[in-house]
Amino acid sequence: MKKVLLYFALLMGTCSLASAQDIITKKDGTDIRAKVMEVSPTEIKYYAWDNQEGPLFIVKPSDILVIRFENGANYVVDNPEKVALEVNNAFFIHHPDPVSVLSDGNLRYKDLKGAYSTSDYVYLSTPRYGLGYPWLNLIIPGLSQYCMGEPGLGTMYLLLGVGSSIITGVGYGLVGSSAISTNGGIRYEQPQFNTGTTLALIGLAANIAVTVTSIVNAYNVAKVKSLYAEDLRNYRQGYSIMVAPTVLFASAPTGLQPAPGIGLKVTF
């Protein structure tokens, strides 16, 4: 009876030890008993289970099929070819990491201007933001930026426009206040008149510069954000068909074991 109890205790201890380790299954079917330390899109770091004080091993996720953690969770490594196929649905993007740009649909112009070339705008048949938007800035500088979802740029040009208008108004005010009525007509106090005229001219020049600059900027915003909207539409509505590795778990005398295979994946 004691032998039976001892055997049972050893068996339970062995099962407990086996379940406390992580199992990394490579695409060639090899199992690695490990203590996984880190999983990222670019690398997987682990210690060998029987030598956790030894070297830290690093493998590429593209070489791994599935990781079974000690808590029973399973992590199936996504196929990087899927990401490449999805990115191929983006037509205009010029960026070293297209996924990071396309996965965020709320990027501002400052985040996009380095990823798109405004010369690609001519290839858009139905741009989201037409080139009529920039001319709104003739009414109020920054208005077109507001209409295209760029409140930061819109506020900047609006404040610059208001500032230049204030300078112009102060200049005209000084010119007007320098006028003195005389019996023979009106004469102007020269120092005050000169200061007012200078301020008025500076304000007018600044106002013109702000308006022109805001229109040019609005043209670039319209082009870049239209290209981005087109890429997002193609990226989200596109689809890909590919053969990808799959894993099923089958019952075996030692418990559930992964059964690697190949499956057809259709991504919409």
Image (cartoon, grey):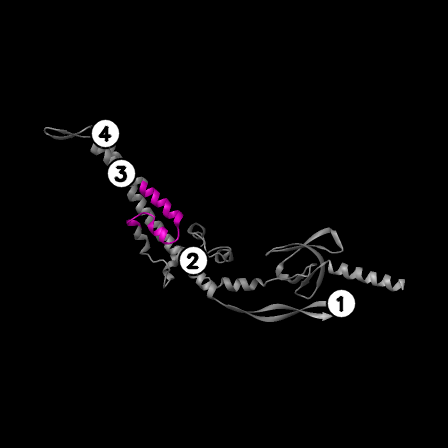
Q: Nearer the viewer, residue 132 or 255?
A: 255
Q: Which residue is mark 1?
A: 254
> Where does label 4 land, which residue?
192
Q: Give the residues drawn in magenta, as a range.
A: 137-162
Q: Which mark is residue 168?
A: 3
Q: CA distance from mark 4 to mark 3?
A: 15 Å
- Mark 3 residue element: helix
Q: Provide residue 25's location: percent of width, then percent of height.
A: 68, 63
In the displayed structure, 200 sits above or below 64; it is above
Q: Residues within 10 Å of mark 3 (few under 14, many from 20)?
A: many
**Mark identifier at residue 228:** 2
Q: Secondary structure at mark 4?
A: helix
Disc with the residue nearer the chain's start (1 vs 4): 4
What type is the residue that disc 4 sits on?
Gln
- The answer to whether 2 appears left or right of 130 in the picture is right
* Kind of residue at badge 1: Thr
Image position of 243 (left or right of 73): left
Which image quarter: residue 258?
bottom right
Query: Which part of the image, by quadrant, shows the N terminus?
Result: bottom right
Query: Which sits earlier in the primary sequence, circle 2 or circle 3?
Result: 3
- Apparent side of residue 267 relative to residue 202 in the rendered image (left or right): right
Residues marked 2 and 3 touching at CB (< 8 Å): no
The picture places residue 173, in percent across and down from the top left corner, at: 23, 35
Front in this rendered view, residue 217 or 258: 258
User: Are dots 2 and 1 in contact, CB under 8 Å?
Assistant: no
Majority secondary structure of magenta residues? helix
